[in-house]
Image: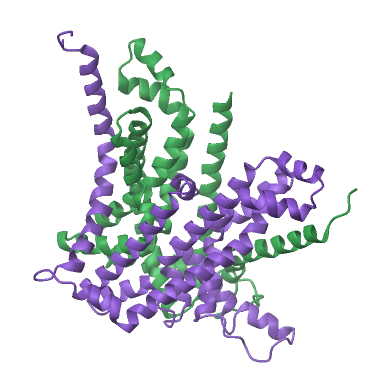
């Protein structure tokens, strides 16, 4: 065995490591101080108030108002995800199957609202959907209806506006996945005598499933924590979990209860990511924007 | 020409309807903002600039606009160097912990924003940062960092680190070789990341609802309050201006990215 001598390259490597950690530390510090610490604080506050207590969680899991809100949030998120998939799949499919110029046009139309403020779009939906809004006036002009339809300040308005905001998060991962499906496979299916619909359902659809999973995860998770849209378009009746959190803080000063609701929501979201990451890479889910 | 199948026609029709649905709200705001009517009417009765006048002559809206622009600018100034330094370290270092750090830096995209907002509110309340400009900037730096990191990492991926090695072997120190060799090549990605951080800060609403107040309320907070109380076409005027600003910035950012992609392909 050789006696260990101080290795200059090892010293160099340690310096290199130190430099890299120094470079990453300002950003890391910001994230630790402004998201890890605050969330940790919430978790602490949810179980500690003049001593340890599970009272907040007992309330969250037993009181009706909390249960109803969690159930409603889950239902809306599920509904929004299904609608977004049904609307987004054809668009992604079309963008994937037309010449380049057309697909760029389609994708630009998908991304355009993506970069419009959520607040601006909430305003636009109010303008479109309210009793004296554009759509009601148009329908009355056409004599389709005699009384204005109630399309906003309820769950309907919330869902319409939420799907609108989340649709790009569905279309982009779908399109990215479809792009990677080799076109020869479809031709092979056709040359073997399969009808176009059979090749679609047996070849294309299964291969696009990773994109479906990525898109659905993103839409569902974002919807679980949605705040502005239900607050402005839900008319106070559609109380989603995020609104429960904010009301407990702003109106009732129930910090412990707000924290417990936030922790339950966060655990749910992280659990979903953990399960999904067993099937597809998380970069695929997150790297869209 | 081949016959177009009914399935194909259905695909075209459905996609067209979905695209109309996506684009309609974005297009409806501008005409409302130029309408003379007090209430939302469509089509607008006559052309008028009164809502823009109302916006530009209202000191509260002007103060909010100044706050928004200041916060967005400072956010970019802080988040861009922090994010680029972190991305550089993540892409160059072989330390295993960097993978974890990379994940941690993307946390703002994972944690529901309402949770982040309430958490920050509690922490800021303890240390007296609620309703201050530094508090607002700090929160937006945190929210904007992931965009800079993701964008800069994408740029660094197509950059060959051997080039920096060459510069250093020729006697440049590390810092100089970074600024002389690496940075110019990833410049477009860095600028794009900075622009996205700017847009993120400009549009951010939920955290601002909780932590901003008094004289330091950004536009989005005032708009949110106004939308909850009464709908006034002034909001349409502001929305139109904000949307125009976002689009110009996005065009700049994506244009730069594309040019960058072309360069790296050569």
Q: Which residue is drawn at 38% across and 74% down?
A: A70
Q: Which image quadrant is residue A147 in?
A: bottom right
Residue reaching furthest bottom? A146
Q: Would you place residue B131 above or below residue B105 in this image? A: below
Of residues B261 and A195, the one drawn nearer to the viewer in this rendering: A195
Horizontal and vertical percent position of residue B21: 64, 66
Of residues A80 and B230, the one drawn nearer to the viewer in this rendering: A80
Q: Would you place residue B79 above or below residue A272 in this image? A: above
Q: Residue at x 20, y 17 (%)?
A: A11
Horizontal and vertical percent position of residue B250: 53, 48
Q: Is residue B66 visible?
A: no
Q: Which image quadrant is residue A248 in?
A: bottom left
Q: Would you place residue B105 above or below residue B11 in this image? A: above
Q: Is residue B99 left or right of residue A162?
A: left
The chain drawn purple is chain what? Answer: A
Q: Residue at x 60, y 80 (%)?
A: A133
Q: Residue at x 33, y 62 (%)?
A: A266
Horizontal and vertical percent position of residue B159: 47, 26
The quadrant of the picture occupied by the C terminus of chain B is: top right
Of residues A23 and B134, the one drawn nearer to the viewer in this rendering: A23
The chain drawn green is chain what? Answer: B
Of residues A177 and A125, the one drawn nearer to the viewer in this rendering: A177
How are the residues colored? by chain
Horizontal and vertical percent position of residue B232: 49, 76
How many marks are shown on the rendered structure?
0
Q: In this view, does A147 lie to the left or right of A184?
A: left
Q: Can residue A63 be seen in this view?
A: yes
Q: In this view, does B58 lie to the left or right of A47?
A: right
Q: Which image quadrant is residue B95 in?
A: top left
């Amino acid at each position: 065995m050789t006696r260990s001598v101080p290795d200059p390259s090892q010293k160099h490597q340690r310096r290199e490591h130190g430099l890299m950690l120094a470079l990453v530390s300002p950003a890391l510090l910001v994230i630790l101080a402004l998201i890890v610490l605050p969330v940790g604080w919430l978790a602490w506050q949810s179980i500690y108030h003049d001593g340890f207590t599970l009272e907040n969680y007992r309330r969250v899991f037993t009181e009706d108002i909390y249960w109803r809100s969690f159930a409603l949030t889950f239902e809306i998120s599920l509904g929004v995800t299904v609608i977004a998939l049904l609307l987004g799949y054809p668009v992604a499919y079309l963008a994937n199957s037309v010449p380049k110029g057309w697909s760029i046009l389609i994708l630009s139309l998908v991304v355009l609202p993506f970069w419009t403020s959520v607040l601006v779009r909430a305003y636009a939906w109010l303008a479109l959907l309210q009793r004296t809004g554009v759509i009601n006036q148009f329908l009355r002009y056409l004599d389709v209806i005699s009384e204005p339809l109630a399309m906003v300040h309820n769950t309907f308005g919330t869902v319409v506006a939420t799907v609108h905001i989340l649709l790009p998060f569905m279309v982009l991962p779908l399109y990215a996945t479809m792009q990677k499906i080799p076109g020869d496979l479809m031709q092979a299916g056709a040359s073997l005598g399969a009808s176009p619909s059979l090749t679609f359902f047996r070849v294309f659809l299964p291969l696009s499933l990773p994109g479906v999973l990525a898109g659905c995860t993103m839409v569902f998770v974002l919807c679980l924590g949605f705040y502005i849209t239900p607050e402005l378009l839900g008319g106070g009746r559609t109380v989603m979990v995020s609104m429960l959190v904010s009301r407990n803080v702003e109106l009732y000063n129930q910090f412990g209860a707000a924290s417990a609701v936030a922790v339950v929501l966060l655990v749910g979201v992280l659990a979903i990511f953990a399960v999904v990451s067993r099937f597809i890479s998380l970069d695929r889910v997150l790297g869209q924007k | 020409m081949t016959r177009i199948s009914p399935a194909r026609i259905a695909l075209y029709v459905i996609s067209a309807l979905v695209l109309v649905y996506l684009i309609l709200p974005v297009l409806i705001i501008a005409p409302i903002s130029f309408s003379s009517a007090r209430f939302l009417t469509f089509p607008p009765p006559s052309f008028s600039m009164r809502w823009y006048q109302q916006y530009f002559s209202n000191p509260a809206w002007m103060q909010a606009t100044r706050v928004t622009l200041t916060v967005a600018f400072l956010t970019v100034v802080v988040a861009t160097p922090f994010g680029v330094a972190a991305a550089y370290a993540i892409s160059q270092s072989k330390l295993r912990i960097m993978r974890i750090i990379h994940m941690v830096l993307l946390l703002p995209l994972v944690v529901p924003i309402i949770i982040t907002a309430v958490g920050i509110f509690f922490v800021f309340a303890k240390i007296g940062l609620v309703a201050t400009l530094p508090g607002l900037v700090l929160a937006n730096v945190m929210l904007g960092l992931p965009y800079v990191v993701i964008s800069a990492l994408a740029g660094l991926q197509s950059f060959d680190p051997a080039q920096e090695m060459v510069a250093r072997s020729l006697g440049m120190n590390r810092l100089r070789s970074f600024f002389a060799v690496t940075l110019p090549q990833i410049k477009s990605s860095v600028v794009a990341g900075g622009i996205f951080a700017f847009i993120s800060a400009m549009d951010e609403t939920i955290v601002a609802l909780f932590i901003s107040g008094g004289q330091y309320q950004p536009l989005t907070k005032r708009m949110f309050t106004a939308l909850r109380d009464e709908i006034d076409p002034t909001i349409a005027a502001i929305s139109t201006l904000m949307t125009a600003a976002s689009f110009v910035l996005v065009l700049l950012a994506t244009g730069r990215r594309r040019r960058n992609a072309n360069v790296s392909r050569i």
